Image (spheres, rainbow, N blue to C red):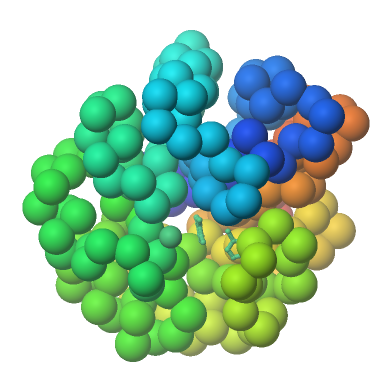
Amino acid sequence: MIKNILRLYFIMGSMNTQENDPLDVLEKALQGGVTCFQLREKGVASLQGQEKYSFAEKCMKLCQTYHVPFIVNDDVELALALNADGIHIGQEDEAAALVRKKIGPEKILGVSVHNVEEAFLAQKAGADYVGIGPVYTTSSKEDARIPAGTKVIEQVAIQYPNLPIVGIGGLTEGNLVPVIRAGGAGVALISAIASSQDPRNQAKQLRDKIEQVLEKE
Ligand SMILES: Cc1ncsc1CCOP(=O)(O)O
Ligand SMILES: C=C1C=NC(C)=NC1=N
Ligand SMILES: [Mg+2]
């Protein structure tokens, strides 16, 4: 069930782990209990071409070892070439309906949305879930929009109760509860785990917190 994999959705690229080895950070996050992983290799220091492909392949193999879905951000061709479990696209990427056609009905399709209208269109195009944010300020996305809090999550959850939502943007163990209360099935994040000196324990604490809040829902 899609909602279950959205609980603790770790996102990372090779540029997010400072001096630590990204594959080591990913393995620790998987051991700590992340429920989904998205490779988001973009921006100034991102890997390209063959380097990007082999890094992505190593990430996918790690996810397979831990039976965690492996999602590729933006790059549909890379997702298809690797036979990834899914793809996540933003409003400025390829149209969701076209991507759904390319990847087929079985793969996971996630779409970033910023309002109810975009959520409606994403669901119509066949999205399995929508990512809504930034909830709080973030330093992990250069062109992030103004933080919206959990307002849009609430609006979309009310309008489309069957559309799984994951909140994103500046999320930490201390501020994630409102995302679940607003109707999020889980939280997507980068730095809370990728910048942690103990990614495994950080992932475990986040997972425990999310499970605790979901049980009360
Ligand atoms: C990809 C993305 N989309 C909205 S905010 C963001 C970055 C989230 O990173 P962090 O969890 O470190 O704030
Ligand atoms: C921008 C994004 C929003 N949501 C998710 C899950 N991933 C992203 N890359
Ligand atoms: Mg994108």
Q: Relative to the observer, which residue lies in front, 104 or 44?
A: 44
- The quarter in which the N terminus is drawn is top left
Looking at the image, is 101 positioned above or below residue 34? Answer: below
Instruction: Kindly identify the residue that appears in the image at 13 percent across and 47 percent down.
Output: 102
Question: In screen coordinates, is 183 left or right of 78?
Answer: right
Q: Is residue 141 visible?
A: yes
Location of residue 80 with respect to 155 vertically, above or below = above
Locate residue 103 relative to residue 49 in the image: left or right: left
> Where's ligand 3: which quadrant?
bottom left
Q: Is residue 176 visible?
A: no
| Residue found 30% across the figure and 52% down from its top | 109
**Residue 163, percent from left and from top:** 35, 66
Considering depth in this image, is 118 or 19 the residue closer to the camera? 19
Residue 197, compared with residue 128, is above or below; it is: above
For the point 68% across and 26% down, which residue is it?
22
Q: Nearer the viewer, residue 110 or 90?
A: 90
The relative height of residue 125 versus residue 197 in the rendered view (above or below) is: below
- The picture quadrant where one finds residue 71 is top left
- Horizontal and vertical percent position of residue 168: 61, 62
Query: Residue 52's spot in the image, x, y percent?
Result: 46, 30
Quarter occupied by the C terminus: bottom right
Q: Is residue 88 left or right of residue 39?
A: left
Residue shown at 48% from the left, 80% from the top: 114
Percent of width and height locating residue 25:
72, 25
**Number of dots carrying numbers:** 0
Residue 167 sits in quarter: bottom right
Name the residue at the right extreme: 197
